[in-house]
Amino acid sequence: AQESRGLGDVYKRQVFSCLIFFLYFSRLLMSRKDSAVSVASLSPADKEGFLTKQGGGWKSWHKRWMVLKGSNLYYFKSKKDKDRTGVIELTKDSFIKKENKKKYCFAVGTEKRVFFMFPETQVEQEEWMNTLSQVVDNLKKGGSGKSERSASSLPNSNKSPVASPVVPEKEKPTGDSVTTTNGPSSLLKAAVKQIPFLQDPNSKPMEFWEIWQESLPDDIQLFKIVVSLDLSQISWRCTGPQNKFIEKMVDFFWNVGAPEPEIDRLNDVGTLINPLIIGSWIDMSAKGGMDGGWHFPCDIPLKLAIEASDPGESTTKVSEWSAQNGFDAVVSVGRDMGAAPPRQTHFEFTLQGDFDHQLQVALSSFSSFGFPGLPEDAIQVIKSNPKGPLGLSIIISSEGFVKLGVLTPRPNPSALSKLAALSGCSGHSDLIDKFQKALGVDGVHMVEYKFLQKGFGYGVYKEGFDVVFHYLVAKR
């Protein structure tokens, strides 16, 4: 909730682009013919094969089975699809040209939009560009657009790609704003030096962190860092505008081997919700834990957020609990992109009402979702600092509830020693102090009292009750 409110003014300007996104997809759906177009119905095709194509409103990359038939380039999710995902209609005014967005990337320009796509090899790039350019040339001459099966489309051809028509190069963008030396990214690098298990530059967690950090755009607005009090577990989360973030975020997931169905899931949920603010996160631990995923940290109707989760008893319980307690929205939803199931979906709620009511709802949720109650000492610390609003963090999977946490605002300094004792980390206050100083923040943003169910720590994360600190590092 704090992230959403803190960045609200920055993203209000993007509401218009959100509307354009909606209208674009509305027109797309209305333009679809009533009759389905299957891959089989287009046989024999003028040319077909896999290309990785960039989406329109939601700028992620997806492998698509492309089928050229006449002047139409259809794309499908698989070779056996019974209906197309979309179609690119070529005209005499279309253009084909190389692009540097990706290796072997080329652009197909139409009156409505410029499409970007790439194959696996340079030979395939040349074949596709030759064939599509030939279609455009035929249309210019008044033909049907059907490409001739000539040497230009054969793998052994020595003919150069045809660039028809010639298109002037677009003005190069100035790029994102560069983070200053005391910006969020620099502060994160300083904080990493205070994490004991990240001091080995050759460790897998450190390598993972560097890959993630390098994938981030320069104009990050906000980082959230969640740490255990002995710094043995840490979660890094970043937040920024969708239009600057999505492409690099998806590239990161590809680079670390996220399953393609999960990248498709991100695309589907992103298209459904169309959040103005998005982010990625990674978790790691001293025992070698490494996980990552995406999150949308903004107000989202629950009926849309729930689409990020897998069907199951835990998903049903969250929906029922929300209805019983009057919640129709979340302030954040996210999902992990791990290589193997079960996938985990994270919901965050801001509790409503006065402090006593918020606390009652938070504490009762533990029994509602099958968790042990919070320790009495933890409850007393929460009551000693009756500030609101409280938050509730819920992680579920198809195999049940994973984690439940109560989020409380900035703690009193006098409570820090009690929190350290609750987490079993009384002797590590110097570590937290140095880490906090490196981040350049003046205190803990939120305290989370959480419980991780047995079996979901996988031997690398602490199971049972724990206390963690949330820090915010914002762009100044």
Image: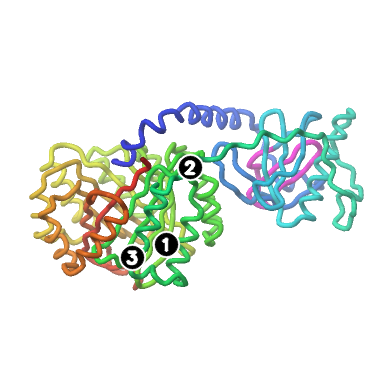
Segment tinted magenta in the rendering = 66-87
Residue at point 45% right, 70% down? Answer: 201
Q: Quadrant of residue 122?
A: bottom right
Provide residue 386's location: percent of width, then percent of height. Answer: 11, 44
The total of numbered circles placed on residues is: 3
> Is there any visible trace of residue 2 in the rendered image?
yes
Query: Where is mark 1, residue-wise?
Result: 291
- From the viewer's perspective, tell me whether residue 247 is left or right of residue 431: right
Residue at point 70% right, 44% down? Answer: 99
Query: Where is mark 3, residue-wise?
Result: 195
Q: Is residue 67 magenta?
A: yes
Of the two numbered discs 2 and 1 on the same chain, state the one appearing first in sequence.
2
Query: What amino acid is labelled 1 in the image?
Result: Asp
Mark 2 vs mark 3, CA separation in Å: 33 Å
Provide residue 383's location: percent of width, then percent of height. Answer: 9, 49
Query: What amino acid is labelled 2 in the image?
Result: Gly
Query: What amino acid is labelled 3 in the image?
Result: Ile
Query: Where is mark 2, residue-wise?
Result: 270
